[in-house]
Image: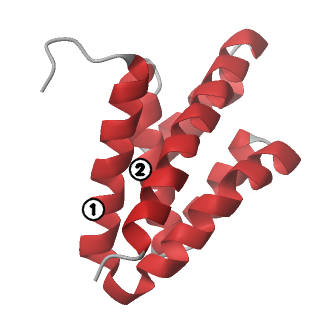
Amino acid sequence: MAERETLEQQRARDAWDCVTDARNRLAYEFEDYVKTAKGLPGLIMNSGLMQAMAFLEQKEGRHAMLGEHLRRWLHERFPDLPAEFGPFMEKLMDAEPRVYQEVTAEAFAWLKWLRQMAAARQGEG
């Protein structure tokens, strides 16, 4: 491991770890996790980050796992943002517009890596 990783390397490593977690925990449902990950940026663009996170939370399986993965990453990048769903949403509701936009931009940047890593791992046996 490099002494000091770039932010892109950190995103890539976290996305790889999340995809590995999804493959291990979801087994046959991993293909659906990949599809959900590919569609999440569009959902965020159309509905907003909080609405997308609420949608993921209300579902089970791959949706809930994807929401958990994204919240954990956002918590790592923004330590004041809790990783647990309820406190996460409350913090975003109270966030200044600039902070909300920064969190949303980071979600898109991380999802770019997650989508690429998930697609790369999709074909593995």
Whether residue 83 is visible here, answered yes or no, is: no
Q: On residue 21, which mark appears?
A: 1
Which of the 4 image quarters holds residue 9? top left
Is residue 57 toward the left or the right of residue 6 in the image?
Answer: right
Residue 32 in the image: state x and y as whole percent.
54, 78
> Identity of the amino acid at label 2?
His
Query: In percent of the image, x 27 and y 61: which residue is there?
Result: 20
Residue 115 in the image: state x and y as whole percent.
54, 54
Taking 28 as reference, is 81 above or below it? above
Q: On residue 69, which mark appears?
A: 2
Which of the 4 image quarters holds residue 35? bottom right
Residue 7 in the image: state x and y as whole percent.
40, 19
Q: How is the image coloured?
A: secondary structure
Q: Quadrant of the N terminus?
A: top left
Camera-nearest residue between 62 and 93: 62
Label 1 Cα neighbours within 10 Å, binned few <14 / some 14-19 / many ≥20: some
Query: In percent of the image, x 41 and y 36: which residue is there?
Result: 73
Label 2 Cα neighbours within 10 Å, binned few <14 / some 14-19 / many ≥20: many
Whether residue 53 is visible here, answered yes or no, is: yes
Is residue 1 toward the left or the right of residue 60 in the image?
Answer: left
> Alpha carbon of mark 1 to alpha carbon of mark 2: how far?
9 Å
Is residue 8 toward the left or the right of residue 50 in the image?
Answer: left
Q: Quadrant of the C terminus?
A: bottom left
Q: Secondary structure at mark 1?
A: helix
